[in-house]
Image (cartoon, helix red, strand yellow):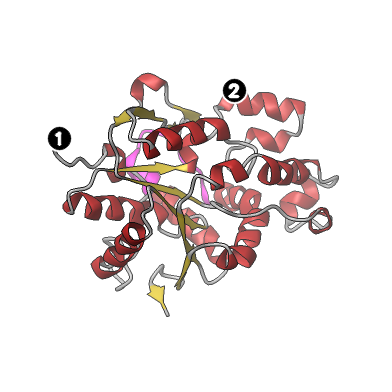
Amino acid sequence: MSPRLHPSAAIGKPAAPSAGGGEAGFAADFVTRVLDDALAAGARVYAISGLQGSGKSTLAAQLAAAAQARGLRAAVLSIDDFYLGRRERQRLGRRVHPLLATRGPPGTHEVGLACEVLDALRAGRSVRLPRFDKLGDTRLPPSRWGRAEAVDLTVFEGWFLAAPAQTPGELAVPVNALERAEDADGVWRSYCNRALAEDYPALWSRLDRTLFLRPPGFEIVVEWRWQQEQALQARNPRRQAMNRAQVERFVQLFERVSRQALARLTGIADWTVELDSRRRVVG
């Protein structure tokens, strides 16, 4: 069978500025280095971890295309593809805490499904790849999922891949206005942290090698996420994306685990790449 790049590799968030400062993605020599890293490690599932807007989807698509150019079959998945559907999250919000109705933080993904899909891809079996409609805020029906077969390399990207849980003491103090106003008793962040400690390690164990795209700090994430939302709206002008105020609130849901990732992932990931505020590779 001829090499095939799974269609999902061309779908994702808008391209990040390149390591050379352009707008077409990361520089080709950097993409080559990443692919060489994946192949040298014998990775069947190569993880790209990085905070929101850091260029994970762009790099994942470029990496899959580079793999195809070498005659390999590649598929791209995001942890976002495994969000619980809107109705499931609404039930969780009623049962545990209202903030769990909003997608994103640990505890709002179907981790078991993600493990099953990665296991099938690693084994070279045919499998359908879930897809999540962010503007519709729900997972697409299985009839609209693409299929991958006999994949040589799976690129799996996500904003907190491989991040560890915090200690109970670290949960005590709110990290932002949203936690102070809407999670004063810590129920929501404790639930998310418990999920991160108990559920996600099984998923992290499926990652053969992890690259961490490390931004200069959490403060840049709002701007990067706003750029994504504007690009998403431009591609879907008939549908309503978030406005700036909604993006700023949305990012606060991710701040606690994002700061944990910034503090801990450099010591956990197999390779950390520093980015500047324009997403250029530095160092």
Q: Is residue 26 visible?
A: no
Q: Secondary structure at mark 2?
A: helix
Q: Residue at x 57, y 36 (%)?
A: 109
| Drawn side of residue 219 relative to residue 192, left or right | left
Residue range of the region highlighted in magenta in the rendering: 231-244
Q: Residue placed farthest to the left in the image? A: 2
Would you name the residue on which mark 2 appears? 87
Report the residue that reaches farthest toward the bottom. Answer: 283
Q: How crowded is the residue under tag 2: few (<14 C-alpha within 10 Å), some, or many (20+)?
A: few
Q: Which amino acid type is shown beneath numbered disc 1?
A: Met
- Name the residue located 20 percent from the left edge and 49 percent from the top edge: 68
Q: Residue at x 48, y 54 (%)?
A: 226
Amino acid on which the number 2 mark rests in the picture: Arg
Expressed as whole percent of the image width and height from the top left, the position of residue 125 reads: 34, 30
Point out which mark residue 100 bears: none
- Residue drawn at (37%, 47%) of the image: 44
Q: Position of residue 13 (x, y in %)?
A: 38, 48
Q: Is residue 82 above or below residue 74?
A: above
- In the displayed structure, would residue 20 be above or below residue 87? below
Q: Is residue 235 magenta?
A: yes
Percent x, y of residue 220: 53, 65
Residue bearing the label numbered 1: 1
Which SS class for mark 1?
loop
| Image quarter of residue 62 | bottom left
